[in-house]
Image (cartoon, rainbow, N blue to C red):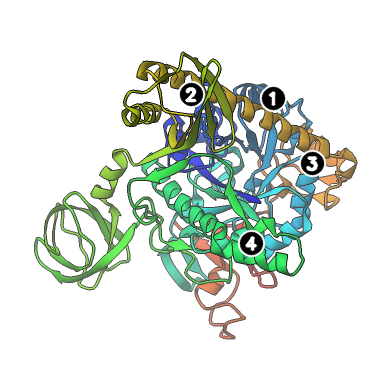
Amino acid sequence: MTKLELLSPAKDLETGIAAILHGADAVYIGAPKFSARAAAGNSIDDIKKLVEFAHQYFARVYVALNTILKDNELAEIEQLINELYAVGVDALIIQDMGILELDLPPIELHASTQCDNRTWEKVDFLEKCGFSQAILARELSLNQIAEIRQKTDKIRLECFVQGALCVCYSGQCYASQAVKGRSANRGECAQICRLPYSLVDSSGAKIAENQHLLSLKDFSAADFLEKMIDAGVTSFKIEGRLKNIDYVKNITAFYRQKIDEIINKRHCGESRNLLQKFEIAGQARNDEYVLAKTSSGKTKIFFTPDIQKTFFRGATSYFLENRKKDIAQFFTPKSTGQPIGKVTLFNINNLVIKTDEKINNGDGLCAFDQNNELVGFRVNRVEGNMIFPQNMPKIEKGAMIYRNFDIKFSKELENKSSERKIEVKFFLNENESGVLFKIIDENNCIAEEILETDLVPAQNPEKSTETIFNTLKKLGDTIFEVADIQLNFSQNWFLPASKIAQTRRMLIEKLIAEREEFYRINRICKINKINNSVNPENLVYPVKSIDYRANVSNSLAKKFYEKCGVTEIAPAYELSAPADAEIMRTKHCLKFSFNLCPKQTHDRQFAEPFYLINSKNRFQLKFDCKNCEMAVLLAEN
């Protein structure tokens, strides 16, 4: 059986709890310091509360400590890691290899996408270092993911499925450091890629003017989940530790339903047919085809999730299958939201939209004006498809209208939008002392309690049975709900409702304690299994020489690479920036976007090198056509 994990972001404690309630199997959250989202730090106390809440559902909590570190920070992060372990955190997401040289408690390590996990050789090395999970580069195709799975052992593969895209390979972007002195590898990215630029050739001829040429649409793998599973992905990550709670509720619920559909499909006819074929052919059962989620509890969603109704820049599947031209949104880096229709009539104080969507007072709409600039407006009043904005936008007939704030959807999310319960079964058996009450949850955790009483036949058997059932079902605001009740009695006995209720409360307390112990033992077993598989003699880094892109910013990271056979180690860009350094490398190619790729055309109307320029910055572009990549360098003004 293959277990799948839906991994959601948690900006804070409240958002983390919402993610769990909307179906997340795990959440990732920033520590007080040293997270790649410096603005999303959380206290140890809040992380502890999140851990306690998540573990009720056997959901896991991962803490991001994925920045590079200075020497004077190593002692502090070692202490922080021990504090996180003490409050029950399940894993750390890290980038800096110097952490491996610290005196660490027995805790799982996940290799951040900032580690630049693009090749099977890199992922294989990380597994031998003791990492249990690797977050793969967003740029990988399904075939590349499958190759990594085939050529590595047991390390779990995690891939993003929804959210913002960095145009540069993660962990390899130095533009913010170069321009603003704010390191993306230190959690301080200034988002240079979201700014407008003009693209010019060496003579100054303009190819594109004042557009967001490095700003990508949001990633969405919603249509590729099953293919990703078959390629070997077991953890599906939603980006967004800076996103608001509505976004996390909506996107988590959306992917919970998508993944559950796949799990249920394979548990039903399709998996049975496949397994029967294996058995008829005399082959072993293909149990990897059968899927399950890693946490427990069933999630009920009380709204219809829609990825376009919370922060949404438009969607792209990026490079999962083939290179596409529509991966960027050149005209705005902002959320456009859901396209709802085009303007058919434009008057002095209103406009008419051809749409099948119901528009409500208070909705936020936007459109691109004549200059391809995004303009937004609030709906003041609606009459059918006639919209009366608070302020009339300067747009034309035929313009596409987008809804980037749906007031009705937002109110649905403000109310109780989900519920998550763990199914339990009650079994009542008579014995010499009275009645043995047994409760079993969906994870086969068991609790028992004897109700000591003299058994007296019920005068009204039907009412007595109804009382037992109704009293046991009253689980209130606990995390449990009753799936079944079985009375194994020789005859109908009378049991006082008060004693049934008291026994039920004691059973629930025992079951919660049993689940806590079960999770604790399972956590220890997982760590021991990982630690026992690590062989220091196998730690040989794939190359002997590393440059600034290895992000070695402290003495322990340097020591680590030396132990792994690396003989030439350059300092991180933040410590010593080479004058000719690439500050970005990306699979997003502007030649391809503007039909100038030599594989598309032989028309050489523009002379290289190309430059990206705006009022403050000037970057030179270099094209690696063999690998279909584009490099960005600082250029002299």
The answer to whether any part of residue 299 appears in the image is yes
Marks 1 and 4, Cα distance to the nearest angstrom? Answer: 38 Å
User: Closest to the observer: 595 or 415?
Assistant: 415
For the residues bearing labels 3 and 1, Cβ distance under 8 angstroms: no
* In the displayed structure image, the side of residue 155 where residue 26 appears, left or right: left
- Kindly identify which numbered label has been placed on residue 129: 3
The answer to whether any part of residue 44 appears in the image is no
Which secondary structure lies at badge 2? helix
User: Closest to the observer: 245 or 35?
Assistant: 245
Mark 3 belongs to which amino acid? Answer: Cys
Question: Could you tell which of marks 3 and 1 lies nearer the N-terminus?
Answer: 1
- Kindly identify which numbered label has been placed on residue 508: 2
For the residues bearing labels 3 and 2, Cβ distance under 8 angstroms: no
Residue shown at 38% from the left, 51% from the top: 311
User: Closest to the observer: 214 or 78?
Assistant: 78
The residue that mark 4 highlights is 230
- Kindly identify which numbered label has been placed on residue 138: none
* In the displayed structure image, the side of residue 410 where residue 248 appears, left or right: right
Mark in the foreground, 3 or 4: 4
Near mark 3 (Cα within 10 A), the count class, few <14, some 14-19 or many ≥20, is many
The residue that mark 1 highlights is 78
Q: Is the C terminus in the top left, top right, bottom left or bottom right quadrant?
A: bottom right
User: Closest to the observer: 15 or 113?
Assistant: 15
Question: Could you tell which of marks 1 and 2 lies nearer the N-terminus?
Answer: 1
Near mark 2 (Cα within 10 A), the count class, few <14, some 14-19 or many ≥20, is some
* Residue 225 image offset from top left, x and y in percent: 54, 59
Which secondary structure lies at badge 1? helix
* Residue 515 image offset from top left, x and y in percent: 58, 28
